[in-house]
Image (cartoon, coloured by chain):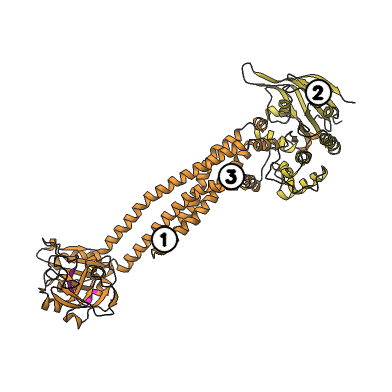
Chain colours: A yellow, B orange
Amino acid sequence: MSAAPVLELADVRKAYPGSPPVNSVAGVSLALHPGERLAVVGPSGSGKTTLMHLMAALERPTSGTVRIAGHDVGQLGDGEASGLRAHLLGVIFQQFFLLDALSAVQNVAAGLLYCAIPAHRRQEMAIETLQLVGLGHRLGHRPSQLSGGEQQRVAIARALVGRPAMMLADEPTGNLDQATGREIVALLRELTQTQRTALVVITHDQAVAAAMDRQVELRDGRVVAERRNP
Amino acid sequence: MSAPARAGTRPSRLLAADVLRTGTIGLRTRRLRALLSALGIAIGIAALVSVLGITSSSESALLAEIDQLGTNLLSVSNGQTIDGQEAELPASATAMIRRVSGVTAVAPTAQLAEARVYRTDKVPAFDTGGLAARAADTSLLGALGASIRQGAFLNRATERFPVTVLGFQAARSLGISELRQPVRVLIGGQWFAVAGILNPLPFAPEIDRSALVGFPVAARMLSYDGHPSHIYVRTDVARTARVAALLGPTADPENPGSVAVSQPSATLAARVAVVSAGTTLYLGLGIVALLVGGIGIANTMVIAVLERRTEIGLRRALGARRGHIAAQFLTESVVLSGIGGTAGLVIGAAVTAAIAKARHWGLIIPPEALWGGLAVAIITGSAAGLYPAVRAARMSPTEALRTG
């Protein structure tokens, strides 16, 4: 395991204004190393999604520090935080969030759009990555022409195409049937191994969590249990 | 390779070509909506371009008329008598004017107050149709730059006989449109054969409404007394103003103040000014249409931002900065108005061409109207897209993703 963690959270808190304020994340500390797979589990409303948004530099912590590849997210401007997302992170959503107007290749290539890579090179990299996730035969299809599992594979390829240091997946199997969900988890495991990409999966599915190297359980914004999977 | 070494805090970047690509996704996926939004701008720009084009073309037609007429034509008269007839000038006026340096041609005419013009002897005496009989000589055609529509003008022979040439309006009033059969009209109770009809003379309406006869026959049959009432003077172009100043004292040395000297081209110049004045009003209407078009685009863009919250959130997650999101929606708005503006230019030019053709004007669309029209369209698009773009950029990415 490499010495420098790709993600480091130190006493991270996120409160939303209100009376009383809502403490979505209330003091989380953890570290993730390159190639490591972490599951964040917990019931609905436990702060899992907010935690993922903090890890993805989409939110800034109210207090504490979030470091991605050594960079303190709280200290970065919009351009630099966006740069981290473009160059170092890949995000996968439960609802896939593919653009209907674009083909599978174009959707994957969109993952490189904000890295200033020329269009033809983006296309080549997108084709390679789609082949990697087993969709080499579906390059020109629109999302509406693909099954749920295939759509999630396109979304995974989009997160992976820039060879990120870390992928973040929010309930990646939530919209899929069990068998397809298992395939997706297996694919994520395989890809993190071959690409040496760290992975954080937010899930409430114990089977998915058990497939990761370690899992932390979140309740009311706090880590209440942490264990390494066998 | 360790993770921190992969990239520093490099800001995310969007290539210029990709700004255009992402900025047209919305237009490509919602074509009908894009078309309808662009239509508003197209109508506004078409109105602006056609107003400017039609004004320029009609002005050019008037200016061509002035050129053809020449600015060196002067008209000398002595006002009107109490019963509305042209007042007489001294009998010597024509000869005196000929002597003025700078005068190149002089054509005297005399309104024959007693001689009424009728189509037949069955027409009641009071029904004069506003037509006048006028004595003229062969020099009139050349001095006015007038031309014959049908038949022939007066000549040395016909000016001695009961022969007349009709002005354009006079011929129309008398119901005479062609001279293949011999045609006669009644002037001062005598039958005159119609020898010719003149083309319209918008700058000399008094000739337009006259039946012209020769001086000798006028003296013999229509009691012409030797006094001209309206003299047309052609001058050396460079000396028109100086000649105009001398014409009053020359024509009537005893009452120089009563002589009216006018420059017919000035009337046409005034018409040019009137056409230009109307332009402002129509331009105002065009701008209102453009404003409505701009509001249409702003409305479309505000709706697009609301509809595409998820896309905005996703793009932020993929590394888009706020500026990239703003640029995407601003580009969409500018492209939308650019398309509308271009269509407007084409429509405006086509309308101008059609009207110019129908009115027999030369087609002139000022270049300023074309590039100015496109610039106005793009400025409108930028203004319309600014608020939606800023709103999209300020949207919290996590909020946008949650609502997806």
Secondary element under disc 1, as helix, strand or loop, is helix
**Main SS of the magenta segment?**
loop
| For residue A54, side relative to residue B360 (left or right) | right
> Does the magenta-highlighted stretch encompass residue B371?
no
Query: Disc 3 marks which residue?
Result: B332
> Which percent across, then down, holds residue B221?
11, 77
Chain to which the residue tagged by mark 2 belongs: A
Chain to which the residue tagged by mark 1 belongs: B
State the image quarter where residue B189 is shown.
bottom left
Query: Which mark is in front, 1 or 3?
Result: 1
> Residue at (59%, 39%) from the top-left corner?
B304
> Which percent across, then down, holds residue A145?
74, 45
Are discs 1 and 3 less than 8 Å apart at CB? no
> Residue at (73%, 23%) from the top-left corner?
A44
> Which percent across, then down, holds residue B160?
16, 81
Number of residues whose C-alpha sits closer than 10 Å to that of mark 1, classed few (under 14), some (14–19) or many (20 or more): some
Query: Disc 1 marks which residue?
Result: B355
Q: Any mark on residue A216, and which?
A: 2
